[in-house]
Image (spheres, helix red, strand yellow):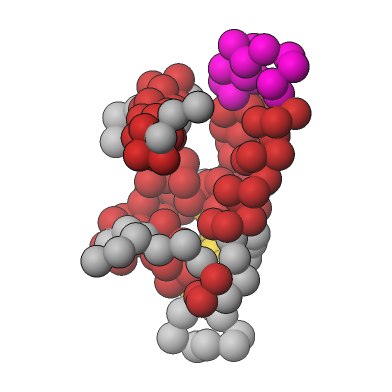
Amino acid sequence: MGTTENTAQLFRDVVRLFVRDQRENAGCMDSGLTVRCHILNELLRDAPLPQQALVDRLGLDKAWISRAVDGLCMEGCVSKEPNQLDKRSVLLSLTPEGKTRATSLNLQLNHHVGELLAHVPPAQRAALHNALQSLHSALNAPNERSRIKCRK
């Protein structure tokens, strides 16, 4: 087995290559529309959402998110409604067209993953699944103290 440093570098390379490959192979991940795809996915997972929640989740500039949301609204994929809990913000939801588009995107991305997983020997798939579950739990830790952070 490799050293921790080698494993870390391998993991980072796999993630980098995976993200690049998904951008190249997914229907709306071209022509600089990656932010829109991330928005569609976030809203498909958990909507309605305040626009600020997208800024926080995606870690992107407010202006970028705002322009992308406006574009998705003009395309008929996202709707904005007043936030009853915070009158200064709006809640974003997928329209039926947006839900269709986001669902199609997710199917494309899942198909891509399936093709990649076909390269993993069947005997190793359960171990990979368990390792991914552990990483998922670490990245989704419910409180800030237990989340894994980069050192500054």
What segment is highlighted magenta in the picture? 112-125
Q: Is residue 136 above or below residue 30?
A: below
Residue 12 percent coordinates (x, y): 37, 37
| Residue 132 shows up from this direction | yes
Q: Nearer the viewer, residue 61 or 28?
A: 61
Screen quadrant of the C terminus: bottom left
Residue drawn at the location 58% of the way across and 48% of the way down: 135
| Residue 51 shows up from this direction | no
Q: Nearer the viewer, residue 36 or 56?
A: 56
Residue drawn at the location 50% of the way across and 88% of the way down: 87
Q: Quadrant of residue 122?
A: top right
Residue drawn at the location 62% of the way across and 15% of the way down: 120
Main secondary structure of the magenta stretch: helix
Q: Is residue 94 above or below residue 85?
A: above
The count of marks equals: 0
Residue 119 on the magenta segment: yes
Residue 21 percent coordinates (x, y): 41, 23
Residue drawn at the location 59% of the way across and 11% of the way down: 119
Residue 54 percent coordinates (x, y): 46, 63
Q: Nearer the viewer, residue 17 or 52?
A: 17
Residue 148 on the magenta segment: no
